[in-house]
Image (tube, rainbow, N blue to C red):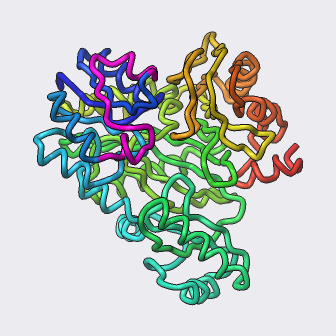
Amino acid sequence: MLTKVLIANRGEIACRAIRACRELGIKSVAIYSEADRESLHVKLADEAICVGAGTNADSYLNLANVLMATQISGAEAVHPGYGYFSERANFAVALESLGVKFIGPPTGAIEAMGDKASAKKAAVAADCPVVPGSDGPVATDAEAIQVAEEIGYPVLLKAVAGGGGRGIRRVNNSEELSGLWKMATAEAQASFGSGEMLVEKFVINPRHVEIQVFGDTFGNMVYLGERECSIQNLRHQKLVEEAPYADLPAEVRKKMGEAAVRVASSVGYQNAGTVEFLVDTEFNFYFLEMNTRLQVEHPVTEEITGIDLMQLMLRTTSGEKLPFTQEDITLKGHAIEARITAQDPDNDFSPSTGKITGWRAPMGRGVRMESHCYAGLTVTPFYDPLLAKLIVRGETRAEAVSKLQAALHEFEVEGIATNIPFLRRLAATPSYVEGNFDTGFIPKFLDGEAV
């Protein structure tokens, strides 16, 4: 077993990793920015090292400083969490050069799946259905128009190096493509350092469904059920996630899971990863992308499988085999995760900053909280607005929805604006309660069309 791990992240995911380390008897090292000096992950870790000033570029994304902290700490391995360096092959390569393990997939898998064009080719080679579209990156808006007219509108412009909903635009006709092309490429360049784009057919009224996969270093690979992630904001960022997808036929679940394993295995994948699909109204599924890291929404998978994914990442990196086979995986109950953010729903979801003067988190049977916040903590403008993840579990989806409604009613944060009031309204909307939604739900909800 590893003896010391550095957590190259912040916030709730850093706290989650630190707790998993302590449960396994592993010493943890936190890194932090000057702005995060009082953050909970700093207080929980066995050691903590400052890696720079407040901005991400000066601290959590300062490669030299993070590598120096790793060397100073004497950590044997680094857990990247999600975001930041979690899907950057150069970080894994740099750690390897220092003799430090990267808790994640091999660099070749990161590179193959980090580029959406090569990921799509890998899916095709693995006999996994893909959305019709360009064979690779398109160079100009004129070329994009040509592809779009061949496959038919509407289409999606998607950043090749994208993620987190950035660099994506829906295009309904050729007249609006050029303008949206400029917006998407500029956003992609600013976010990922690359403006390369793909053009894909826009699937009408789809569900966004993802399969959790996990592989060890001995060639064993399993899928751990699916998550339904269709409740997304206007920037395609997930707000509410569920496991399992309640209406998914068992035979489709099996086919999707097996396709996800084929895709992951084709690039020599190891550790935790997620293969994402679009599912249409007839339950046809299409490969979307693969995230080569642990997902924000991983707790709902843990709740229905009984498997601690964070501990499993640490164990397999330590050289252990997966302690189960595909036949051992069973899904029990239903779990829902709601992301609590420091955003003002009444002011176009603008970020909210300041000191948290009151923090009353919900409790009770079937309620789980993942957070780095407490009364007295100052929320700064430097980072993602995620404050907490509220996870509930019930024996049925109906029970889980009721628990979600009750927990959101109990949740109180004072001093800053949050999206809790918005989530309360959403969770009480009959169409959500009945499971009657798709990826277009939030725009309808905001326009008062979702009832």
Q: Is residue 364 above or below residue 38?
A: above
How many marks are shown on the rendered structure?
0
Q: Residue at x 63, y 28 (%)?
A: 354
* Quadrant of image for the C terminus: top right
Q: Nearer the viewer, residue 361 or 45?
A: 45
Residue 141 appears at what percent x and percent y? 57, 84
Q: Is residue 400 magenta?
A: no
Image-quadrant location for residue 326: top left
Q: Is residue 41 magenta?
A: yes
Q: Is residue 129 left or right of residue 423?
A: left
Residue 183 appears at what percent x and percent y? 61, 71
**Residue 281 appears in the figure:** yes
Q: Residue at x 78, y 36 (%)?
A: 426
Q: Is residue 167 left or right of residue 46?
A: right
Residue 94 appears at what percent x and percent y? 19, 49
Image-quadrant location for residue 440: bottom right
Q: Residue at x 84, y 37 (%)?
A: 430
**Residue 325 appears in the figure:** no
Range drawn in magenta = 38-62
Magenta span: helix, strand or loop, mainly?
A: loop
* Quadrant of image for the N terminus: top left
Q: Residue at x 49, y 33 (%)?
A: 301
Q: Is residue 409 above or below residue 228?
A: above
Q: Is residue 76 above or below residue 88?
A: above
Q: Is residue 251 above or below residue 7?
A: below
